[in-house]
Amino acid sequence: MNKQEEQDIQFQIECLTNELIIMLMDDYGLSMEHALDTVYGSNTYKKIERPSTGLYYQGAVYAMDMLKEELSSQR
């Protein structure tokens, strides 16, 4: 993978993460700080940041469904 591809993947990861944070704030009424902690502390995020999973390339709704499932299993 060349430098440009790595930068493109990192950009997609950041965009997807941003969308998840906004969705958590909207859907669950979380503060930005709580939404940030939730996303960055999740197993879903660990999968997103690993390019080999390809999750960074999926839509935000798909990733959010994974995150919601993860959060519901923690309760």
Image (cartoon, grey):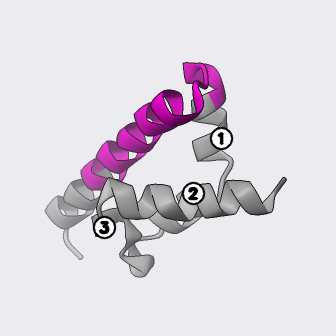
In the rendered view, would you say 39 is above or below 54?
above
Residue 27 seen in this snapshot: yes
Residue 49 seen in this snapshot: no
Q: Position of residue 30 (x, y in %)?
A: 61, 25
Q: Which range of residues does the magenta coloring cover?
A: 11-34
User: Residue beneath label 2, please?
Assistant: 67
| Residue at x 59%, y 33% (from the top left corner) | 28
- Please tell me whether mark 3 sits on a helix, a strand or a loop: loop
Left or right of residue 47: residue 61 = left
| Residue at x 59%, y 55% (from the top left corner) | 68
User: Residue beneath label 1, please?
Assistant: 38
Q: Which mark is residue 58?
A: 3
| Residue at x 20%, y 62% (from the top left corner) | 3
The amino acid at mark 2 is Leu
The amino acid at mark 1 is Thr
| Residue at x 24%, y 76% (from the top left corner) | 1
